[in-house]
Image: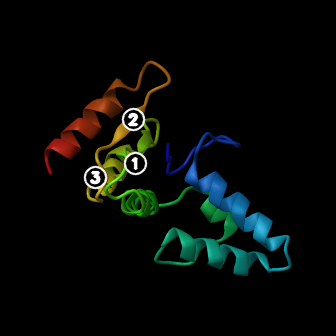
Amino acid sequence: MIYRNYPDDPGPACLNKEAAALARYISQGGFEESEAASMVTWFLGLPEQRSIDEIDAAVPEEAVALEADRAARMFSGGPSVLPIIYLGDEKVASTALAVSRTPVDGVNFFTYRDGLEPAIELVSKRLSAE
């Protein structure tokens, strides 16, 4: 599972919360918060600097695509890589599209409650238009 963001703290497998926690942990090791945020921003492959609070709020779709790309390249020729994306994300369609452009073997989605059917339809239309 690789979720771009999750509004609640702590969230399940969510990149924003895990990256922000990593930045906070680094800052406890003697680095300024801005330095720690800079390290995590670089690791996530983000084009512009973000504060720890900005990372905690959400990361862009490209960060999820980069993580999917890293996993696909790491396991190239081995097991299938099928990232599971959070359907409740307001940017689920653009995140799925970004991930589908990487060398992964497919994209899957986690549905945990009723009412996410419109998100499934939106993602299906967006991916089939490509």
> Marks 3 and 1, how far apart in space?
14 Å
Quadrant housing residue 85: top left
Q: What residue is shown with label 2?
A: 109
Of callouts 3 and 2, the N-terminal one: 3
Q: Residue furthest front?
A: 78
Q: Is residue 36 above or below residue 4?
A: below
Q: What residue is shown with label 1?
A: 91
Toward the viewer: 54 or 2?
2
Give the left or right position of residue 89, taking residue 73 as reference. right
Looking at the rendered structure, the secondary structure element under dot 1 is: loop
Of callouts 3 and 1, the N-terminal one: 1
Residue 119 screen position, x and y as percent: 34, 33
Residue in view at x 68 percent, y 66 percent: 52
Q: What residue is shown with label 3?
A: 100
Decide: few, some or many residues near mark 2? Use Cα within 10 Å; few <14, some 14-19, many ≥20.
some
Residue in view at x 46 percent, y 77 percent: 47
Residue 71 screen position, x and y as percent: 43, 57
> Marks 3 and 2, how far apart in space?
13 Å
| Amino acid identity at mark 1 | Lys
